[in-house]
Image (cartoon, rainbow, N blue to C red):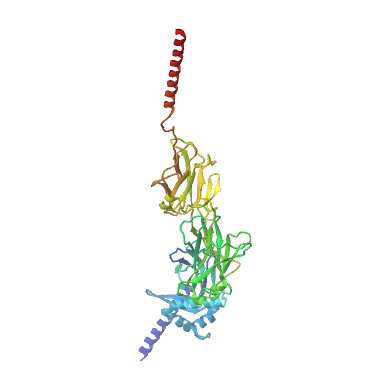
Amino acid sequence: MKRMKRIMALMLAAIMMMAMSVTAFAAEGATGTHTLTVNVKSTEPAQDLKGQTINLYKLFDVTESKSGETTNYAYTVNNTYKDALASVLKIGETSKDEEFVKAVADQEATIQQFANDFTAKALTDNLGATKTSGKITESKTSYEFTGLDAGYYLVYVTGGKEIQSSLVTVDADTNTVNLKTEAPSITKTADKETVSIGQVVKYTVTGSIPDTTGYAEYVYKIHDELSTGLDFVNDAAGTALEEGATTVTVAVAFGEGSTDASTAPTTATLDSTNKKKMSLDLSEWVRANQTNKGKEFTVTYYAKVNKDAVVTEKNNAKLEYGNNPTDTTTTTPSEAKTPTYPLDILKTKKDSNVKLAGAKFSLYTSEADAKNGTNPIKVTGKNGNYVVDSNSTTTEFESVENIEGKGYNLRVNGLAEGTYYLVETKAPDGYNKLTAPVVIKITKSTDTDVNNWTISKDGTVETDKIIDIANSTGSLLPSTGGRGAIAFAVIAALLVFGVAVSFIRDKRKEA
């Protein structure tokens, strides 16, 4: 019996020593500071952290111990977030640490939802972050936090299209967490790839309802700026804005057969000093549509191509967003390119570099019209420079002797991609008119550089983008009763006169 008591005492002592050694090891594991690297997962379109803020919330302190190859973790709830955790986990605020730990462990199947729910609670209650990156001003796909105490952290990137948080235990020198976050963005498209002057272009900006959970304020504004060759109009018919207008008509809609968007604004505000700039404030509308967060919507509006349009015609829309009205983020502009093209003609004397003035042309969009002289393209202009103008009554354009600094002496600007038929209606004085239409084909660029467009004449590409048109001239054609006949008549008359004179002389001698 005494031996048994002695054995039990030795075993108890051994157990206490092991417990003490474990405790000492755990305390040792909690010392020092650590690094956490937050990465943005690759998404399409590519995302980075510029303009966003990463907040860390340390939900639990953590200590660890090792038993052979096994690592044991002990968690203690962080009092800063205890009430919020209790609310999200639906347990009592006075629950013990192990009850909080168990409640989180029980969320394993829905751990992402728990992370998102806690984030929403922290934002709604305006709970301060344990550590924050502040607004990131550079384009980067990762951010490194240093000097972190060991703990169980919630990582949240603000300003995303939806709440997307991650949970990670920081307990080693280097830790990594990957976040799939997508910042609000928009894309702008046009219903035409190339345009002619006078056409109306329909623009569509596509965005999605951001998650504004927990934000007392949220800014969501679309800014659009047209280029010189475009003017805002109110509809597809090209109804011009009234004199002194301060707004332009827009239409906001969700996908076909989807949610009603009738509460959205129907006008955008024009800039007071530049009527080619407009701003559409959807801040209150997106906050009121949180049941549709993540859902795509479109904004459509119209612009008309004016006489100043060029090949490099492009315009852009950008999104301003953020939960702090005094410190918002503006996205990279989304561009829509709508090039228009010139027809440059070099009118010369055949087999020479002599430029010819006074040649007149008309342009058609079909071979039948070119042959019949019907439906010519209308233009306005003078001195060799013309632009397409559907409101004009002029259908001819005329070459000049020279346009300073140009390799052509006649230009018609404002044509869309396509095939055209150029008819010479009058040749310069003393030159022969062309007998058949010249087939002109304009082809848009096949890459991102709009200047890589081409133009061809009768199937041959003009590498300098100038159409060469030559006129011929020559001597008069032979005709009956010409100069030869007159000469013979004169000679005959002289001969007759000579014979007559000789006859008279002979008569006088005889007398």
Q: Measured along the vertical axis of the image, is residue 425 above or below residue 40?
A: above
Identify the residue at horizontal 46%, vertical 59% (top origin).
192
Percent position (x, y) of residue 509? 46, 8
Report if residue 129 is visible in the image: no
Percent position (x, y) of residue 408? 49, 42
Q: What count of labels does the image hold?
A: 0
Q: Measured along the vertical axis of the image, is residue 272 above or below residue 253?
A: above
Identify the residue at horizontal 44%, vertical 26% (top origin).
486
User: Quick one: 19 or 51, which is closer to the camera?
Assistant: 51
Q: In which quadrant will I find the N terminus?
A: bottom left
Identify the residue at horizontal 63%, vertical 62% (top origin).
244
User: Quick one: 47 or 420, which is closer to the camera?
Assistant: 420
Percent position (x, y) of residue 214? 55, 76
Report if residue 283 is visible in the image: yes
Percent position (x, y) of residue 353? 47, 36
Q: Measured along the vertical axis of the image, is residue 409 above or below residue 280?
A: above
Considering every residue shown, the one lying at the far front of the view is 511
User: Quick one: 22 or 317, which is closer to the camera?
Assistant: 317
